[in-house]
């Protein structure tokens, strides 16, 4: 049984990755900040939860000990913060701690080679963002930090890596973007008219498992994990309404400044309440501005290297509207289908 370390195993994408690796027969070591909440989120077979903190674990030796103790064969770094909420340092969480981890992986492979024991190559999958492609990416701390760690991985670590750059990620019932709930609102506010290319969280997770299964197929690649269609935010909401056969509410384009003022007012609420509200706790002026910028990317390499069947947003919500079973069957068909290129 191959042993995969997933750092950032909680939150939105993390549990989907853990579930898909577990289903695919891996033993999954989950690096998390909060053991108790992780145990609730990660109730899948062959899972072990260990405590890590990317804001503090900046010493490669800390990571080397963990790699040795858990005999890790592959690593997915899924941690990423878009702002400094909760007193975190973006530089530490998105750049310095991953660098320490990557350095540790290098030494771990080297000492295994010297001792002639497995694993001698540990594949690393780094979850980045398509925001790195923006010309003015350096103007925003989040994509700037992702660009920095991507570049360090490419240039300095000497590791076998795959960088996956997802676009906006969605999944019914989970995550930061509950489209099926937004579709039912009488007034749907959206910002900007730029294009995005949302990807379903399961397409992403199934694709990443396949990359890890056969890492040499995509070795040292940068893959744009974008969905099959470029759409504006308005088209996203209307697509979901149509697929769920809902009369859509009034769509109002909200000026950026208004959205920022509204969010700033929300942020004055007590921190505990903000965290309970989830999405609102993680929005700041930069995050909102980034939502208006749009971003798209060519997914042909992603599809070729993963052989995954792209999940269309309309199909996703049409199956969901039919019944939970129809939706689950649709997701299962994605796991089962290998599209030969
Ligand atoms: N969601 C999207 O639309 C999107 C689009 C493009 C790229 N991405 C990238 O995809 C990855 C996952 O995103 P997501 O939407 O699932 O984000 P998320 O829900 O906010 O999850 C982020 C993960 O990072 C962990 N984390 C944060 N600070 C940490 C720390 N100090 N030490 C250890 N772990 C820490 C979180 O743990 P806690 O649960 O303890 O907070 C969580 O497991 C990120 O790298 C993100 O940049 C996301």
Image (cartoon, rainbow, N blue to C red):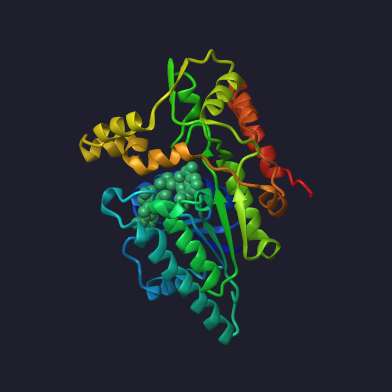
The residue depicted at 65 percent of the width and 47 percent of the height is: 298
Q: Nearer the viewer, residue 104 or 301?
A: 301
The residue depicted at 50 percent of the width and 73 percent of the height is: 105
Q: Position of residue 41 (x, y in %)?
A: 43, 45
Q: Position of residue 39 (x, y in %)?
A: 40, 49
Q: Total label count? A: 0
Q: Nearer the viewer, residue 244 or 249?
A: 249
Looking at the image, the residue that sits furthest to the right is 340
The residue depicted at 39 percent of the width and 49 percent of the height is: 82
Q: Answer with the quarter of the image where residue 190 lies.
A: top left
Q: Is residue 289 left or right of residue 110?
A: left
Looking at the image, the residue that sits furthest to the top is 247
Is any part of residue 42 visible from this angle? no
Relative to 280, is 121 above or below?
below
Q: Position of residue 76 (x, y in %)?
A: 52, 59
Q: Position of residue 157 (x, y in %)?
A: 52, 73
């Amino acid at each position: 049984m191959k042993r995969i370390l997933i750092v950032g195993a909680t939150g939105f994408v993390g549990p989907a990755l853990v579930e898909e690796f577990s289903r695919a027969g891996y033993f999954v070591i989950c690096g998390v900040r909060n053991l108790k909440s992780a145990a609730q989120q990660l109730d899948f077979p062959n899972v072990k939860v260990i405590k890590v903190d990317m804001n503090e674990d900046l010493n490669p030796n800390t990571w080397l000990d963990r790699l040795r103790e858990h005999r890790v064969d592959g690593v997915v770094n899924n941690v990423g913060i878009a702002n400094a909420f909760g007193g975190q340092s973006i530089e530490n969480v998105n750049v310095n701690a991953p660098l320490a981890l990557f350095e540790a992986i290098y030494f771990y492979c080297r000492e295994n080679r010297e001792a002639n024991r497995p694993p001698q190559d540990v594949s690393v999958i780094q979850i980045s963002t398509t925001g790195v492609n923006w010309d003015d990416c350096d103007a925003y701390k989040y994509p700037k930090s992702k660009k920095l760690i991507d570049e360090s991985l490419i240039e300095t670590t000497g590791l076998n890596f795959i960088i996956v750059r997802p676009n906006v990620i969605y999944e019914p019932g989970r995550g930061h973007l509950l489209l099926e709930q937004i579709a039912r609102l009488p007034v749907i506010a959206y910002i900007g008219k730029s294009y995005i290319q949302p990807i379903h969280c399961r397409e992403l997770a199934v694709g990443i498992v396949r990359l890890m299964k056969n890492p040499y197929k995509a070795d040292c690649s940068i893959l744009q994990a974008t969905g099959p269609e470029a759409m504006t935010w308005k088209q996203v909401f209307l697509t979901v309404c149509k697929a769920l056969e809902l009369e859509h509410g009034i769509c109002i384009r909200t000026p950026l400044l208004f959205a920022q003022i509204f969010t700033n007012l929300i942020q004055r609420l007590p921190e505990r309440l903000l965290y309970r509200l989830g999405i609102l706790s993680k929005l700041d002026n930069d995050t909102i501005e980034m939502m208006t910028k749009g971003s798209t990317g060519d997914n042909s390499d992603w599809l070729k290297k993963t052989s995954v069947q792209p999940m269309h947003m309309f199909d996703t919500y049409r199956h969901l509207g039919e019944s939970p079973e129809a939706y689950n069957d649709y997701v299962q068909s994605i796991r089962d289908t290998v599209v030969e290129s």
